[in-house]
Image (spheres, rainbow, N blue to C red):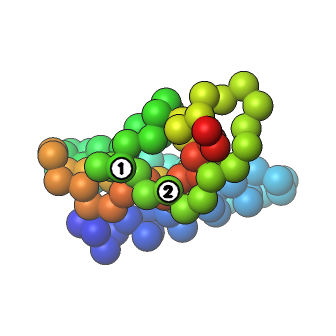
Amino acid sequence: VVKLLPVLDDLVRALEAAEHHEEAKVLEGVRMTKDALAGVLASEGVEEIPTDGAFDPHVHEALMTQPAEGVEPGHVVHVIQRGYRLGDVVLRPARVIVAEG
């Protein structure tokens, strides 16, 4: 399962890039592929780790801190790479930027 996560990351990046172009069919195809892969992972119990709210060292990896207006210190400001878990096991922590406190 861990080997499939980079594929999902690549599809997410491709969708983000394709949204800036007129290639609607390509975008639709990539989106369908990403959704299918995410569905397979979900059917096996793989869940994305939530990143809204406070930093949790058990499921998040802080890459850096930065000042952030309107965000409480110690809360996630930006997600660099999504994290995933299988039940209680963290397959990969979410890599995040955290508000300075």
The residue shown at (31%, 74%) is 3
76 vs 89: above or below: above
Residue type beneath disc 1? Pro
Query: With 83 as the anchor, is 65 left or right in this view?
Result: right
Q: Where residue 89 sits in the image (x, y, percent)?
A: 17, 53
Q: Quadrant of the C terminus?
A: top right
CA gap between label 2 and label 1 equals 8 Å
Q: Is residue 51 visible?
A: yes
49 vs 93: above or below: above
Q: Where residue 61 sits in the image (x, y, percent)?
A: 43, 57
44 or 77, which is in the foreground? 77
Query: With 33 as the anchor, is 1 left or right in this view?
Result: left
Q: Quadrant of the N terminus?
A: bottom left
The local crowd at label 2, few if under 14, some if 14 to 19, many if 20 or more residues have their Cα within 10 Å, is: some
Q: Which residue is mark 1?
A: 57
Q: Which residue is mark 2?
A: 62
User: Element type at marker 1?
Assistant: loop
Q: Where residue 43 sits in the image (x, y, percent)?
A: 21, 45
